[in-house]
Image (spheres, grey):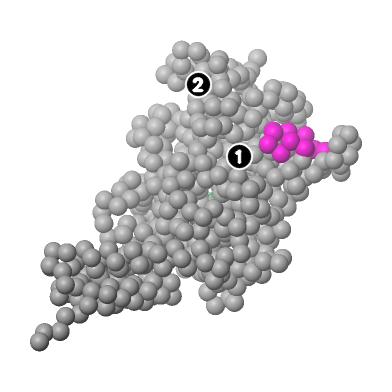
């Protein structure tokens, strides 16, 4: 008599194996395509013969695979929603506790910063925004999470940088290695080096103002307005090319002939989505069509970096001079390292600065009283005959710096902040009365903190540079209302040893361009400009994009 395995036994075996596979995923977090295929496809297929006694071969395979996957999904969902999950005590929407896919989808729409701010308003200062991830909107977390004894960089860069053989500085999560790679950046952008870089910035700023001052029919619409945002993109790209690659780009003159900005922007949308799904890294490496736009962007940047390497030691001390250790301060780094960081310079250095410049002029042009006040300050520091490109007064100009701070408070280019992770082997992280176990991904949410009335009040959502002036004067109640300005809650360049390496350069650029434009140009918004539409169109793909900013520009009389 032949023995037939009851179908219940076959089903129970498959369910049991699915539980074991869940355990393997939870414990070891396998990342390779081959391991995924083995665990998710080969294992249930291998179990399908158990059903052959009761089912035809054509049905045995789907029954085995579906039972396996359904069990696995239910087991994962049950665990993630259960009170035994280590992040169970943190509130958040159900769908985000279940999977990172919904947040990847929200990011694709470019509104993650607004969505996360709404989550904080609804759920409080600590919100669970992923199965294993929290967002924090308490500025007291900035120091312990991002400072010297803070956490390591999070996994958001895994898939984003999957096309590179070597991680760029921003993606390095081992603090020792990060420190080593950060050294040339610090040498390149310290106070003394910034002095060397000053003429490069001044030349490009001068060129920008000169070109804006002449009416160029190719770039002006029928209403006489030009898109200022585009000019800032061209300016910052040309400048970063000068800095990082010894020149080679003339967008200010030729426009974006090679459609480089659209390429960078589409690449950023994809890489922002992939940032939520680090396990996709190996898929991107394995399948050529996966992340194709990102790869196109990457190879364009790599090509630029390789061209600069071929030039060898040029006399000017640009950023590359230091990245390539041409100053001889350290051993020459391997070429892929230099290329990875040169590529980072293009994205980190150009998109961010042009985003802030657009925001500054959007704020000034929609607040004419601030524009007039800034112009008076520029004129008083730089009377006729003196160029505002000279940096000698920039750091001391209170209103100029208040305008820049305020624009970056409202529209920080990296609005969602930079992710960190509680290191494995650290025993976890305690913050106030909260505990975050090893492996918890955290983000101190910049946009929420910058617009929170507990940190900036009154009118946290309004452009009001005067708040910085009053606060600096210690004038907390003189306005007939309580003024709150928590400088520790303003961190557009992030915080700690892995903060923005280009902060000094960025501030130099912003102060120079704004002062020179205000000194030499008259600007008004194009007819029919809709400020609400402008803000609604500001999308965030890790870096805040710039909608069209039509401005009528004339040489100042
Ligand atoms: C207003 C303009 C800019 C803003 C608001 C800005 C902001 C930021 C932020 C928030 C980060 C993330 C830091 C972290 O992970 O904690 C960052 C990283 C970085 N930025 Fe900037 N950035 C600006 C301009 C620049 C410029 C001009 C450069 C020069 C090339 C630059 C180079 C870098 C580099 C190299 C990193 C990686 C730092 C590291 O991981 O150690 N940035 N930036």
* Residue drawn at x 75%, y 29% as measured from the top left: 377
Q: Is residue 376 found left or right of 299 in the rendered image?
A: right
Q: Is residue 137 found left or right of 19 in the rendered image?
A: right
State which region is magenta: 458-470
Image x and y of residue 464, in percent = 73, 33
Q: Which residue is mark 1?
A: 411
Disc assigned to residue 226: 2
Q: Nearer the viewer, mark 1 or mark 2?
A: 1
* Residue drawn at x 63%, y 66% as measured from the top left: 150
Q: Is residue 550 visible?
A: yes
Ligand 1 under 8 Å from disc 1 Cβ: no
Task: State how far apart marks 1 and 2 are (Cα).
Answer: 22 Å
Mark 1 Cα within 10 Å, few/some/many (few <14, many 20+)?
many
Asked if residue 505 is positioned above or below residue 49 in the image, the reply reads above
Circle nearer the N terminus (1, 2): 2
Asked if residue 381 is positioned above or below residue 157 in the image, the reply reads above
Asked if residue 274 is positioned above or below residue 381 in the image, the reply reads below
* Residue drawn at x 61%, y 64% as measured from the top left: 89
* Residue drawn at x 57%, y 58% as measured from the top left: 128
Residue 464 located within the stretch drawn in magenta: yes
The quadrant holding residue 255 is top left
In-front residue for pair 521/393? 521
């Amino acid at each position: 008599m032949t023995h037939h395995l009851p179908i219940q036994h076959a089903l129970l075996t498959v369910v049991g194996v699915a539980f074991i596979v869940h355990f393997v995923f939870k414990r070891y977090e396998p990342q390779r395509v081959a391991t995924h295929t083995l665990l998710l496809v080969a294992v249930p297929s291998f179990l399908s013969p158990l059903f052959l006694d009761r089912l035809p071969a054509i049905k045995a395979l789907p029954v085995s695979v579906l039972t396996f996957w359904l069990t696995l999904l239910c087991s994962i969902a049950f665990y993630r929603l259960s009170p035994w999950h280590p992040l169970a005590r943190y509130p958040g929407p159900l769908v985000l506790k279940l999977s990172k896919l919904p947040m990847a989808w929200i990011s694709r729409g470019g509104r993650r910063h607004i969505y996360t701010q709404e989550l904080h308003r609804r759920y409080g200062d600590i919100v669970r925004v992923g199965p294993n991830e929290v967002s924090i909107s308490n500025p007291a977390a900035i120091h312990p999470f991002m400072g010297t004894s803070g956490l390591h960089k999070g996994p958001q860069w895994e898939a984003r940088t999957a096309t590179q053989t070597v991680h760029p500085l921003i993606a390095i999560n081992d603090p020792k290695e990060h420190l080593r790679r950060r050294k040339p950046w610090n040498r390149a952008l310290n106070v003394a080096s910034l002095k060397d870089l000053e003429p490069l910035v001044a030349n490009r700023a001068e060129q920008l103002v000169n070109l804006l001052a002449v009416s160029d029919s190719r770039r002006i619409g029928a209403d006489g307005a030009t898109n200022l945002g585009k000019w800032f993109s061209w300016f910052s790209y040309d400048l970063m090319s000068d800095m990082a690659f010894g020149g080679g780009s003339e967008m200010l003159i030729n426009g974006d002939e090679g459609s480089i900005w659209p390429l960078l922007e589409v690449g950023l949308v994809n890489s922002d989505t992939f940032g939520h799904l680090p396990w996709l890294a190996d898929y991107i490496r394995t399948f050529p069509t996966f992340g194709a736009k990102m790869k196109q962007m990457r190879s364009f940047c790599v090509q630029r970096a390789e061209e600069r390497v071929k030039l060898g030691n040029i006399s000017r001390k640009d950023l590359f001079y230091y990245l390539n250790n041409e100053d001889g301060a350290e051993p020459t780094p391997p070429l892929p390292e230099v290329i990875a960081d040169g590529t980072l310079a293009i994205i980190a250095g150009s998109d961010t600065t042009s985003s802030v410049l657009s925001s500054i002029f959007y704020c000034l042009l929609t607040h004419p009283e601030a524009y007039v006040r800034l112009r008076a300050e520029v004129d008083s520091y730089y009377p006729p005959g003196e160029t505002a490109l000279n940096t000698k007064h920039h750091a001391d100009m209170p209103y100029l710096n208040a305008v820049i701070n305020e624009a970056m408070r409202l529209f920080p280019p990296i609005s969602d902040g930079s992710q960190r992770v509680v290191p494995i082997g650290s025993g976890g992280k305690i913050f106030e009365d909260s505990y975050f176990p090893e492996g918890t991904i955290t983000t101190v949410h910049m946009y929420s903190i910058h617009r929170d009335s507990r940190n900036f009040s009154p009118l946290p959502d309004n452009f009001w540079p005067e708040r910085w002036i009053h606060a600096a004067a210690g004038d907390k109640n003189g306005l007939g209302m309580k003024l709150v300005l928590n400088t520790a809650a303003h961190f557009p360049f992030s915080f700690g040893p892995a903060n923005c390496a280009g902060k000094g350069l960025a501030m130099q650029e912003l102060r120079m361009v704004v002062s020179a434009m205000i000194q030499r140009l008259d600007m008004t918004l194009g007819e029919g400009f809709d400020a609400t539409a402008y803000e609604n169109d500001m999308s965030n793909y890790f870096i805040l994009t710039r909608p069209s900013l039509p401005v009528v520009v004339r040489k100042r009389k």
